[in-house]
Amino acid sequence: DNAYLITHGLAKDTLSRLRDVETEQVSFRKGLVKLGRICGYEIIDGRMETEYVEIETPLEQTMGERVRGLDDVVIINVLRAATPFVEGLLKAFPRARQGVISASRDEEAGRAEDGSFPISVDYVKLPEIHEEDTVIIADPMLATGSTMCTVLEHVVENAVQPENLIVLSAVSAPEGLLRVNDEFDEADLLTVSIDDRLDDDGFIVPGLGDAGDRAFR
Ligand code: PRP
């Protein structure tokens, strides 16, 4: 099982504000940025190593520590709800190379028998991925997992397997985590909350509503 919870108190605090129906557009968007930054710090803390380096202060030479691999990070923005989330991640990984993929659920087509949604992919631009990279695919919501599995197909296709392949979400449903884990064993799934369930329309419950709508209009 490759699912991990981000348990930082500030992550829980920020997510709770995002869930609140009273949180309006500007606060919602800022909350997603903040949550992205916290998740970025948690990824560094939990999955990246530091190494000792010699540094020179204005007074003398000493040893310092640097995070290994900070220059080898790729962040993939799954349009559109991930945009503010990625903005926050970039505060933790300012030199990350970025990929953009527009993948969204075709809700008119409805849910298939197996609970999945057909996904329309309109735009894909990914940087080259190298073995030493930490690749973070960011999407605030992982519901049925249909979007993420489609994104992962594009990421995995033609790419060498990166050292760390991380699927990062704020809220996720058990169904979606299981599906992504089944189909892409090589990915680690990081989330701030595993919610109770999906409703008949494929929305995460209790969830936070439609993150894209709440952040953008
Ligand atoms: C939402 C969300 C995820 C997806 C999750 O996006 O941001 O991308 O649904 O659902 P899934 O796990 O069942 O695929 P949506 O399709 O609403 O697009 P938007 O971000 O452009 O609003």
Image (cartoon, rainbow, N blue to C red):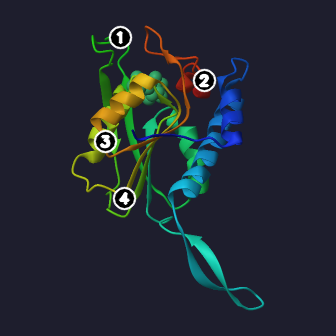
Asked whether the beta carbons under mark 2 and mark 3 sit within 8 Å of each other, the answer is: no
- Give how far apart the Cα atoms at labels 2 and 3 are: 32 Å
Neighbours of disc 1 within 10 Å: few (<14), some (14-19), many (20+): few
Badge 2: residue crowd in 10 Å (few <14, some 14–19, many ≥20): some
Q: Mark 2 or 3, which is nearer the eye?
A: 3
Q: Is residue 59 left or right of residue 145?
A: right
Q: Which mark is residue 183?
A: none
Which mark's residue is nearer the viewer, 4 or 2? 4
Crowding near pointer 3: few (<14 within 10 Å), some, many (20+)? Answer: few
Amino acid type, mark 1: Glu
Frontmost residue, 126 versus 177: 177
Q: First in sequence: mark 2 or mark 3?
A: 3
> Of circles 3 and 4, which is in front?
3
Q: Quadrant of ligand 1?
A: top left
Q: Earlier in the sequence, mark 1 or mark 3?
A: 1
Residue annotated with mark 4: 163
x%, y% of residue 25? 67, 26
Q: Residue at x 32, y 46 (%)?
A: 186
Residues at marks 4 and 2, CA–CA distance in whole angstroms: 34 Å
Q: CA distance from mark 3 to mark 4?
A: 14 Å
Tell me if 164 is positioned left or right of 87 in this view. Answer: left
Kind of residue sitting beneath label 4:
Glu
Judged from this view, the residue extending furthest toward the right is 59
Write down the residue under mark 2: 214
Residue that carries the numbered disc 3 in the rendered image: 185
The residue at 34%/56% (across/down) is 162
Residue 108 numbered mark, or none: 1
Q: Nearer the viewer, residue 102 or 205?
A: 205
